[in-house]
Amino acid sequence: MSKIKVLIVDDQELILESLKIVLEMEDDIEVVGLAKNGEEAISYCEKNQPDIILMDINMPIMNGVVATEKIKPRFPLTKIIILTSYKEVEYVLAALSHGAEGFLLKAIHPKNLIAGIRVVHTGGTLISPEMADKMIKSMQQSGPELVEKNNEFGLSTREVEVLHKLALGLRNQDIAKALFLSEGTVKNYISNIYSKLNVKGRREAAFKARETGILDS
């Protein structure tokens, strides 16, 4: 029986080592690599494609959301489980929208983590009940009014968020950091926003957004 090849990505040495010890106690799992940020994870995938990546979110150089966005199109057979101590819904939604197969909090019991790896390896998806509950609540709170406000132009919730940061004068780089996206994705959102609002630049976009009530003036 071939083992499930797992790459662990986390900037904390202690977490890398403890996860490695826990996983290597299982007969059907092999830890094939350890990486400390998203860039290291990508270069590992180029050399040796793992079956599963356990991906931390908040890391230096390149965070887990951007790494997921870059890895999934290039290595579609590699499955990504986001592992984080953060409970913010935003990061989960961003990572899942880039194709991550699941999400677990770091505080999870090792037994459940191992079960989660097996589920994802056999084609399942994964999200902790606590997180699913949080996401649903967050969508209920932010959904309707955002949709009503921007229906006139058909902007998505994410586009409204980008527009909001843009109107505050943030550069693409800063918007990317704030929303855990890559700069390329932010550029795409901005060009969509310009075409939907039928404007040519940032100032015009911000002005129109305030004038039409998408953003509170």
Image (cartoon, rainbow, N blue to C red):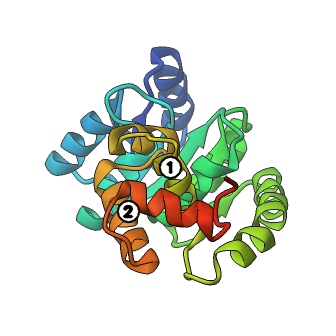
The secondary structure type at the circle numbered 2 is helix
The secondary structure type at the circle numbered 1 is helix
Quadrant of the image occupied by residue 43: top left
Q: Is residue 62 left or right of residue 49?
A: right
Q: Which residue is mark 1?
A: 167
Q: Which residue is mark 2?
A: 190
The residue lying at 85 percent from left, 60 percent from top is 137
Q: Is residue 39 visible?
A: yes
Q: Is residue 193 left or right of residue 131?
A: left
Residue 175 picture location, percent across and down: 44, 44
Q: Cβ–Cβ below 8 Å for labels 1 and 2?
A: no
Q: Is residue 155 above or below residue 176?
A: below
Q: Is residue 31 above or below residue 148?
A: above
How would you rate the neighbour count of disc 1 (Cα within 10 Å): few for under 14, some for 14-19, many for 20 or more? Answer: some
Q: Find the residue positioned furthest to the top.
A: 14
Q: Nearer the viewer, residue 86 or 5?
A: 86
- Which amino acid, mark 2? Ile
Residue 146 picture location, percent across and down: 71, 68
* Mark 1 vs mark 2, CA separation in Å: 11 Å
